[in-house]
Image (cartoon, rainbow, N blue to C red):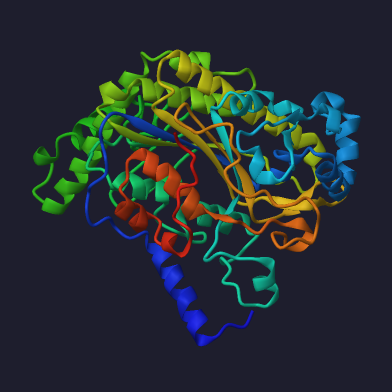
Amino acid sequence: MLLSRRRFLQTSALGLGATGLAPLAARAADQSGYKALVFIFLNGGADAHDMLIGYDQPSYDNWASARSSIIAQIDEFGERGSRSRDNLLKLNPSNSGDFGGREFAMPPEMAGMHNLFETGRLAIVPNVGPLLEPTSRSMIDAETALLPDRLFSHNDQASTWTAFSGEGASNGWGGAMLDAFTQSSPYTAVSLRGENVFLQGRQTRQVALKPDGDIKRAFGTEDELWGSAELSSMLTDYLSNPSNNTSNVLMRDVINAQGRAIADTERFSTVLSGQTLGDSVVVPRNYLSEQLAMIANVIASRSQLGVSRQIFFARLDGFDTHKNHVSAMPELLRTLSEAVTSFQTALENAGLADLVTTFTGSDFGRSLVSNATGTDHGWGGHHFVIGNQVAGGRIAGSVPSFELGNDQHWKRGTMIPQIAVEQYGAEMGSWFGLSNSELNEVFTNRDRFDTTPLGLFT
């Protein structure tokens, strides 16, 4: 794509601004009460066209025509969730008038999330994705559009979604939001799927926690080191007493930091060992629910941990459905729906549902047009925001037509995002307590888009 010198400089400036995730100059974030964000990443490129389906007859016919090969195969396995129109779960959005008579539905395996929508606890945000500027097909065809780097690349787009830069980014917008708060607690950023860039900030450091509560510890500080409990104990004592071990100032700082980490992980383990809220979240054979169960236990421990803000990261793998859509996608959607519903129910029963917002993201959406057995990499995707403070029962944005060739489609029905990740993330940040100036510092390209709230929260 040929660009003018001015456009090249604009692209370069955007890239530099996004990569840096600039440090927050002022700390004015509202820290009152307690709030938690739970980010569920649908890893592999989640097929949004199988989550939000056209339901009025013309929309359904266009949708079904574009993916006839996989619909026929799914319908052969009805127990996995038929895509016949009569089997779909019709949505009744409170803003149905925004869609000119068009109607939408969810597949049958998403019954739990459908109920959350119908009862006002889940909102759908359509066609979200990484953008450098508002973009249309006509701009792309004219080669005047600024496009994110390495579109359709799993690793790069997952990183762009979570850190506004391709693979190798060092800080994400979850960590940057936590940097806005003055808390020094090591328990504010908690990942259930290993360390990830989303939770990494300039000051914020994340804790990697397993669903069974096991916490990654420093080398040698487990119960045994090379089979010796005594050796492990000696190393732990050494790392816990820096002033006794070296006169070197730098080494004392290193050992001191290590000692604090040991104490923090021990405290975390002790606090979590007594929590049982997560027991009511677990769904048999549902690994995402196990992650959310541990998150529920950490939230229930908020007072003991001394935190007023927390961000969690969970991940559901398997969404790269090039060739296995029929066998994988219905089960993935069932897993997501059952886990989210169980988590939300447990929070409500514990009186915590006003304090927690759950939301989804993915490396990208997928093409509307199917290949023989699946769907190909796309760009924009539909996402979900769940919680008692969410203005649920709404589809907060524009849903592209299922008729191919419109200005919101690119090749093979790939959706060109109409809502930038910055706009989507800023909604979470505003609810979380960030001021407008802080939102602009976290989401450095936000001013290139409409900053009017999407209306996701009450």
Q: Give the image location of residue 273, x and y in percent.
A: 37, 16
Residue 313 vs 303, above or below: the answer is below
Quadrant where the image shows the C terminus: top left
Camera-side residue: 39 or 249?
A: 39
**Relative side of 202 to 47, left or right:** left
**In the image, residue 328 lies at what x, y percent?**
75, 36
Residue at the bottom extreme, as displayed? 5
Instruction: Count how many numbered circles sit on residues in the image.
Output: 0
Q: Residue at x 50, y 86 (%)?
A: 5
The front one of 406 and 49 is 406
Q: Is 391 positioned to the left or the right of 88 in the image?
A: left
Check the image and report above or below for 138 versus 39. below
The image position of residue 157, as x and y in percent, is: 57, 56
- Nearer the observer, 274 or 442: 442
Query: From this viewpoint, is residue 329 visible?
Result: yes
In-image side of 399 versus 62 (left or right) = left
Q: Is residue 212 visible?
A: no
**Occupied quadrant, residue 340:** top right
Residue pictured at 72% horizontal, 33% vertical: 106
Looking at the rendered image, the quarter that the N terminus falls into is bottom right
Task: Examine the image and state in which quarter residue 361 appears.
Answer: top right
Report the residue at 51% width, 23% height from top.
Answer: 344
Residue 96 in percent (x, y) is at 66, 38
* Vertical comparison of 454 with 31: above or below: below
Residue visible at 48% across and 29% down? 387
